[in-house]
Amino acid sequence: MQILQEIARLPLAERIELVEQIWDSIALDAGNQPMSPAQRAELSWRIDHPSETTFSWEQVQARARASRQ
């Protein structure tokens, strides 16, 4: 694909910026997509069967900080 060759010639900082812009545009579009039947079924199952091994964001952060020490 010609566009990939053009992108490969860009300096690293510009390629990173381009990826960030692409990712942001994907995130915006993804939020507007309806869930598939499989995704809806999985979400329903997870709501009906909460896991005992879930962690709050604060717990995840604490574990990450503790592992660095």
Image (cartoon, rainbow, N blue to C red):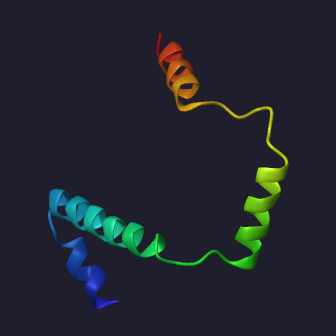
Q: Residue at x 26, y 67 (%)?
A: 21
Residue 51: give x, y in percent of width and height: 80, 39
- Give the residue furthest to the bottom: 2
- Give the residue furthest to the top: 69
Residue 44: give x, y in percent of width and height: 78, 61
Examine the image and state in which quarter residue 42 appears: bottom right
Q: Is 30 left, or right, of 17 in this rendering?
A: right
Examine the image and state in which quarter residue 15 appears: bottom left
Residue 50: give x, y in percent of width and height: 80, 42
Q: Is 23 left, or right, of 33 in this rendering?
A: left
Q: Which of these two is toward me, 5 or 46?
A: 46
Q: Residue at x 16, y 63 (%)?
A: 14
Q: Quadrant of the N terminus?
A: bottom left
69 over 16 or under it: above or below = above
59 over 14 or under it: above or below = above
Q: Which of these two is toward me, 65 or 34?
A: 34
Q: Residue at x 25, y 72 (%)?
A: 8
**Looking at the image, how many numbered discs can be counted on the residues?**
0
Q: Is 59 left, or right, of 10 in this rendering?
A: right
Q: Residue at x 76, y 32 (%)?
A: 53
Q: Which of these two is toward me, 21 or 59?
A: 59
Residue 67: give x, y in percent of width and height: 54, 17
